[in-house]
Image (cartoon, helix red, strand yellow):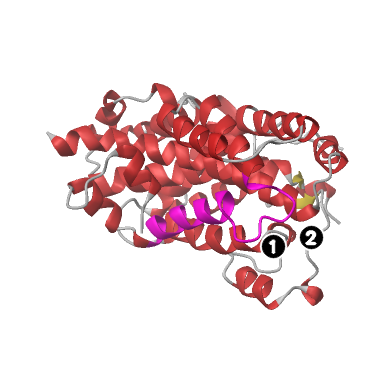
């Protein structure tokens, strides 16, 4: 099974960093598992794969993680179009939550409902933004340990 | 009503979306809730609307915070309090400040962080944890190997640094979920 963080960070199978990650097998499994269900869910509900890719890209880019932003741009390029009104509402919410996590209000959820998001879609969108915020920091911390390991 | 501020008292949480009702939860939602830290809380029942992401997140969260060996539990709790202060999450901060205080019998460390800010004087090991957690939260892209030096200087090994990183990252996640799906209810406002 391909692991996105190992791919992004160039973690080789028999490396010290892979061995370190293997000491926390549930974290390895459910980090990738979260990615899978949020970016490529079997049943995406009312939040399309293209919309999910767009949101993930915005959070990675705002967090300054070039490799993850490039990865998500690839998903955006490979997926279909997003209606402009939906795009604007989703990106506005992703930006708010990525950069000012304490500033959201019920009005922000109403704005999402106004472009057709259901309760489940709003939760999925929130999980997605929150996941990429996690993923960026997990990736950064792992990358810091890599040069020490390679030395 | 008193202004909402960081506290060591227990805080509640009110959702902005109607949570999944316990009585009408599907078997899949039930299973995901049962694997969550508080199966019947409004927070986890709100997350149960998107059951597949909850089913992945709960075991991830559990492993990050509670898996044995590596970074001490109290030190993971401290890191999550620092992240929660920066991100403004009064609910998350209260829960994990209380856990830190229970484990260490040192509520004064948390109170100093609340009252005097993250620069308050601390023992070297706690200082190193606070600084790493703060920078990884605020400026992930600005992190360099130099940021590991204070952790190494207080004797942290790879597994401890890995655990610290995951705790900080998990609360970049938790603070965002908590603060976009609902709001804290302060002790004096609870009936």
Q: Chain of mark 1?
A: B
Which residue position is annotated with label 2? B19
Q: In the picture provided, is A109 more to the left or to the right than B111?
A: right
Question: Residue A77 placed where, x, y %?
Answer: 55, 34
Which residue position is annotated with label 1? B48
Q: Can you tell which mark lies on residue B84?
A: none
Q: In the picture provided, is B28 more to the left or to the right than B158?
A: right
Contact between labelled residues 1 and 2, with CB atoms less than 8 Å apart: yes
Q: Nearer the viewer, residue A70 or B15?
A: A70
Res A25 visible = yes
Q: Is residue A146 magenta?
A: no
Residue A51 vertical position relative to residue B54 in the rendered view, above or below = above
Question: Residue A33 placed where, x, y %?
Answer: 48, 58
Question: Residue B158 placed where, x, y %?
Answer: 24, 45
The residue at 36%/48% (across/down) is: B163
Crowding at mark 1 (Cα within 10 Å: few <14, some 14-19, many 20+): many
The residue at 79%/60% (across/down) is: B19
Residue A83 placement: quadrant: top right
The residue at 47%/48% (across/down) is: B77
Residue A143 vertical position relative to residue A116 in the rendered view, above or below = above
Report the magenta residues as a range.
A26-49
Residue B39 placement: quadrant: bottom right
Return the disc, 2 or 1, that comes first in the chain's sequence.
2
Secondary structure under the numbered disc 2 in the rendered image: loop
Q: Are marks 2 and 1 on the same chain?
A: yes
């Amino acid at each position: 099974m391909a692991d996105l963080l190992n791919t992004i960070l160039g973690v080789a199978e028999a490396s010290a960093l892979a061995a370190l990650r293997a000491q926390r097998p549930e974290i390895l499994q459910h980090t990738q598992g979260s990615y899978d269900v949020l970016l490529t869910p079997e049943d995406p509900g009312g939040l399309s794969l293209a919309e999910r890719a767009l949101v993930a890209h915005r959070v990675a880019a705002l967090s300054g993680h070039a490799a993850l932003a490039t990865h998500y741009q690839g998903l955006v390029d490979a997926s279909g179009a997003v209606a402009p009104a939906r795009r604007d509402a989703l990106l506005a919410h992703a930006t708010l939550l990525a950069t000012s996590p304490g500033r959201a209000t019920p009005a922000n959820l109403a704005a999402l409902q106004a472009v057709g998001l259901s309760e489940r879609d709003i939760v999925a969108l929130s999980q997605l933004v929150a996941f990429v915020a996690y993923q960026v920091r997990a990736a950064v911390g792992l990358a810091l340990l890599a040069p020490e390991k390679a030395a | 009503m008193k202004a909402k501020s960081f506290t060591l008292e227990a805080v509640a949480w009110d959702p902005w979306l109607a949570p999944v009702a316990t009585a009408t939860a599907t078997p899949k939602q039930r299973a995901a809730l049962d694997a969550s830290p508080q199966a019947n809380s409004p927070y986890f029942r709100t997350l149960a609307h998107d059951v597949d992401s909850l089913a992945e997140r709960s075991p991830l969260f559990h492993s990050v915070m509670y898996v044995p060996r590596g970074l001490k539990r109290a030190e993971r709790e401290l890191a999550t309090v620092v992240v929660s202060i920066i991100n403004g999450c009064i609910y998350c901060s209260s829960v994990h400040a209380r856990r830190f205080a229970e484990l260490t019998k040192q509520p004064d460390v948390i109170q100093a962080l609340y009252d005097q800010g993250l620069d308050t004087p601390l023992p070297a090991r706690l200082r190193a944890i606070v600084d790493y957690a703060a920078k990884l939260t605020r400026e992930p892209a600005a992190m360099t190997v130099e940021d590991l030096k204070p952790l190494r200087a207080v004797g942290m090994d790879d597994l401890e640094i890995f655990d610290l990183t995951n705790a900080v990252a998990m609360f970049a996640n938790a603070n965002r979920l908590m603060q976009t799906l609902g709001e804290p209810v302060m002790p004096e406002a609870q009936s």
